Image (cartoon, grey):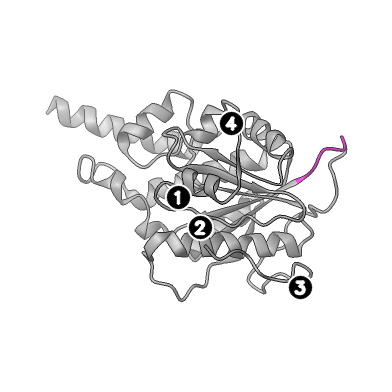
Amino acid sequence: MMSLMHDTEQSPPPSTTRAADTSRARDDGAPAWALVVPVKATHRAKTRVITEPEGLIDNAAIAAAFAYDTVAAALRSTPVRAVYVVTEDEQVAAGMRDLGAAVVGEQSALPVESPGFARLNEAIRTGELAARAAGAMHVAALTADLPALRPADLSAVLAAATRHARSYLADSTGIGTALLAAGPGAELDPQFGYDSAAAHAASGAVAIDVPATSVRTDVDTVDELTSASELGLGPRTAVLFSAYRERVSGGSAG
């Protein structure tokens, strides 16, 4: 997979909203992190969720809720100084700015569903470029479908990541990747796609071995959303999930 090959001293792209300075350590001396969160346009996200009972979940609404709850929780994580959301969805971009995230416009010539998740990896590299240009020394890519994310869990993962030049956290299945991190002098070199945990390991990233259940719990289906609800969903997702369960109960009663 082609790695990020850009001069990190250049200015952020014009479509980037400037985030906080991540070049300095935090007040306690620990590294500050910039997160890159790629977010699909909501009209083409979470299509597997909407197939479960037809019409009972709005996939665009649930995808946006996942992303907002993920970013809001990430911004509350102690090591996180800035979050860069990479998206082509203008409505999502506006909402993310309201949360306090920086937004990098996704402008890709690649097909929407490129082989090997090339477009997703390209979006992550674009976000990393913006973060590095703003002075970030420690950068991590985080998936946008973690509606039960707990700031303390993310803090623990990032603390572990500081011990390695490049590292990753596998998702709950052990197959996918929930987070990919790179420190000073290293590049993320994202390998997201099918069996991405193995791909990241093969590319030299070190596996992060901390429980951090809420960081590992990415959601693609209603069953996974139900499991995530046991951890405690973010507020936007919780409202939609509650409404979904009411519709299911109503249908069963009928």
Q: Which mark is residue 92?
A: 2
Q: Which mark is residue 231?
A: none
Identify the amino acid type marked 3: Gln
- Per the model, the C-alpha gap separating discs 1 and 2 is 7 Å
Q: Which residue was labeled with disc 4?
A: 150
Residue 97, position as x, y percentages in the image: 62, 56
Circle 2 crowding by C-alpha within 10 Å: few under 14, some 14–19, many from 20: many
Name which quarter of the figure residue 127 lies in. Answer: bottom right
Q: Which residues are magenta?
A: 28-32
Q: Mark 2 or 4, which is nearer the eye?
A: 4
User: The C terminus lies in which quarter of the figure?
Assistant: top left
Q: Mark 3 or 4, which is nearer the eye?
A: 3
- Per the model, the C-alpha gap separating discs 3 and 1 is 31 Å
Identify the amino acid type marked 1: Ala
Contact check, label 1 and label 2, Cβ < 8 Å: yes
Q: Which residue was labeled with disc 1?
A: 64
Residue 79, position as x, y percentages in the image: 74, 39
Which residue is pictured at 16% across the width and 27% down the height?
252
In this picture, residue 181 sits left or right of residue 196? right
Q: Is residue 202 positioned above or below 106 on the image? A: above
Lower sequence index among marks 1 and 2: 1
